[in-house]
Amino acid sequence: MALNILKRLLAGVVLLFVVATVVFLALQLVPGDPARTILTGTGATPTEAAVQALREQLGLNLPVWQQYLNYLSNLATGSLGTSLQNNQPVLNLVAQRLPRTLILIATSAAVSLLLGVSIGASAARFGGWWDKTVLVATSVGVAIPSFVAAVLLVYVFGVQLKVLPSGGFVPFERDALGFVRSLVLPTAALALGFTGIIARMTRSSVLGLGQRDWVRTGRAVGLGEGTVFRRHILRNSLSPVLTVTGLQMGAMLGGTVIIERVFNYPGLSGLLIDAVTQRDYPIVQGVVLVIAALFVLLNLLVDIAYGFLDPRGKN
């Protein structure tokens, strides 16, 4: 298992290098001059001399290959560069926003797994009308895009009922209850589709394991139905669920871009969108690279959990 983790780490490093390279080259193809954009943002019409001077100051006049080598050199030293707009280290800007995005993703994933596994397992175990209800409800949940769910939740609970804040973020240290309230709607919007996918996967996995020989053997030796279900069916059904979870976490990371914007949630997505608008390439590169690193880390954690659930994964 340790060798497998090492292989995944090395593959993750290679993937991050590829992502960094692709993002850098893609931004070179974006029309517009960052130096001109910065000077225009001051409200004055910049002269060509001023634009050229700023380009030299920011290193934008260097050949692309030299800019690329400088970029890789900064990454090797743990630096994500400096913002072109406010001259602050990108790493500091990301560090301010990243915990909020991680809180949103972790909360949404925890809610999705808890509800999805519980609902899916109960549907497979009890069947009947409850199973049919779960199938219909999860189909609806998966079909509704997260941004549509976000708008509906804001309209119903934030505008009409006014029971929850429709946007913003409250730090936990300032107001614990306000912190929880500010997370409810964005978490629900982000977790809706994910919960449906987990529930349907859990249901299918439990149904597929219910008639295996080792399950029938457990019943034959006198184990209670609840014990058989918990020890032999539910635990083994979680392996494919974790595989799907690893894939869906990437979609959840992408979904935060829209969700954070709808709810005016001050996470990484707002920083990324503003940087794209302002042609602040170092921030764009830094945020995308951090998101890619999160994706690699999440999949590595899923692989480790899979190894504990599946004994064959420990070898």
Image (cartoon, rainbow, N blue to C red):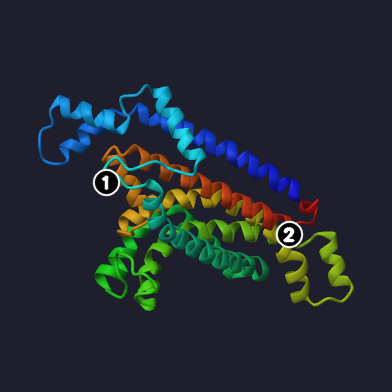
| Residue occupied by mark 2 | 308
| Residue occupied by mark 1 | 86
What type is the residue that disc 2 sits on? Phe
| Number of residues whose C-alpha sits closer than 10 Å to that of mark 1, classed few (under 14), some (14–19) or many (20 or more) | few
Mark sitting earlier along the chain (2/1): 1
SS at badge 2? helix
- Residue 269 horizontal side relative to residue 307, left or right: left
Q: In the rendered view, tell whether residue 132 sits above or below residue 288.
A: below
Estimate the x, y position of residue 124 in percent, counting from the top left: 65, 65
Residue found at x 63% / y 60%: 202
User: On the image, which quarter does residue 152 sit in?
Assistant: bottom left
Estimate the x, y position of residue 171 in percent, counting from the top left: 36, 69
| Number of residues whose C-alpha sits closer than 10 Å to that of mark 2, classed few (under 14), some (14–19) or many (20 or more) | few
Res 176 label: none
SS at badge 1? loop
Q: In the rendered view, tell whether residue 34 sits above or below residue 310.
A: above
- Residue 138 horizontal side relative to residue 243, left or right: left
Q: Determine the residue located farthest toward the right in the rendered image.
A: 221
Residue found at x 58% / y 61%: 199
Estimate the x, y position of residue 140 in percent, counting from the top left: 46, 58
Q: Is residue 221 visible?
A: yes
What type is the residue that disc 1 sits on? Asn
Residue found at x 58% / y 54%: 245
Q: In the rendered view, tell whether residue 95 sits above or below residue 51.
A: below
Between 51 and 2, the one lying in front of the other is 51
